[in-house]
Amino acid sequence: MATSGTTTFNLDFDDVITEAYERCGLQIRTGYDLRSAQRSLGLLFMEWANRGLNLWTIEQRSLALVQGTAQYNLPSDTVNILSAVVRTGSGANQQDIVIDRISQNEYLHIPDKNTQARPAQYYVQRTTVPVAFVYPAPDQAYTLQYYAVRRIQDVGTYANTADVVFRFLPCMVAGLAYYVSLKKAPDRSPMLKTIYEEEFARAAMEDRDTASIYLTPDFSV
């Protein structure tokens, strides 16, 4: 028996919303139903950012550091910074030097934030427009290379596909079905919530770094 030979199955948002409504035992009847589901999808994506890392939203980004400037606005879609290095030189002389993340209190308690040298620490202020602070302030031009967790892209038009890896499609449909049920089919909400949590747990378990890790005890302590 022949197989399709393709692995491109995906759902646009129109199909996602239709599937979610069918799980609620409903049909989409008005334009408001679509707008309501679109709003619920946006809230669902925000909830995923609160649940932890979504590996497909991790991007390597760079930030030009200016001499004497310790504070830098980050792109508005930045959820958090995972790790960072200061890059010096270029080409064969390029070096990436790890810098440590510190807490708000640790940064606050630095007595002279105007000290200039190669940055060795950074603090992320997670406000509406996220801000990165480096210490010491750069004594010359450097490049900050960092891994950022970004927001999942908005729904946009209904013909778009989701900014989501295929492993999370079942979870996305299940989550939207649960969100829709809260408004239109509350009798199904407990069942759909259970399905959603199971789908998310399976997807989150797969969406992880599978590199080996080795721990060595320090007997000198």
Image: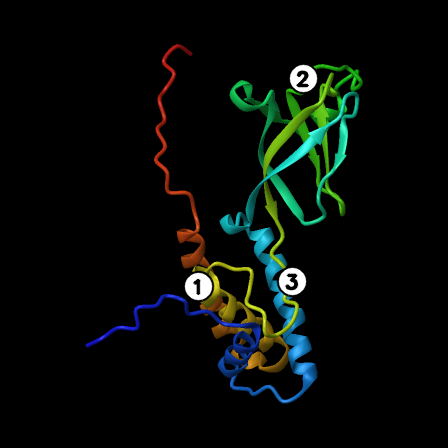
Q: Earlier in the sequence, mark 2 or mark 3?
A: 2
Query: Which label sits on residue 207?
Result: none
Can you tell which quarter of the image residue 212 is in? Answer: top left
- Residue linked to disc 2: 118
Which residue position is annotated with label 3? 154
Residue 73 in percent (x, y) is at 76, 38
Counting residues from the start of the chain, the first of labels 1 and 2 encountered is 2
Q: Could you say where residue 12 lies in the image, as x and y percent from the top left?
A: 53, 72
Q: Residues within 10 Å of mark 2 (few under 14, many from 20)?
A: many
In the displayed structure, would residue 68 be above or below residue 47? above
Residue neighbourhood size for the residue with mark 3, other residues' Cα within 10 Å, grouped as few (<14), some (14–19), many (≥20): some
Mark 1 and mark 2: span between their CA atoms? Answer: 46 Å
Residue at the far left: name it: 1
Real-space Cα separation, disc 1 to disc 3, in angstroms: 22 Å
Marks 1, 2: nearer the viewer: 2
Q: Amino acid at mark 3?
A: Asp
Question: On the rendered image, what quadrant is the N terminus found in?
Answer: bottom left
Which corner quadrant holds the C terminus? top left
Hey, which quadrant is residue 112 in on the image?
Answer: top right
Q: Secondary structure at mark 1?
A: helix
Label 1: which residue?
A: 199
Between 4 and 136, the residue placed more toward the observer is 4
Q: Is residue 221 above or below residue 175?
A: above
Alpha-carbon distance for marks 2 and 3? 38 Å
Helix, strand or loop status at disc 3:
loop
Q: Residue at x 65, y 62 (%)?
A: 154
Point 55% across, 67% down: residue? 161
Q: Give the left or right position of residue 30, taking residue 128 as reference.
A: left
Q: Are marks 1 and 2 in contact (CB under 8 Å)?
A: no
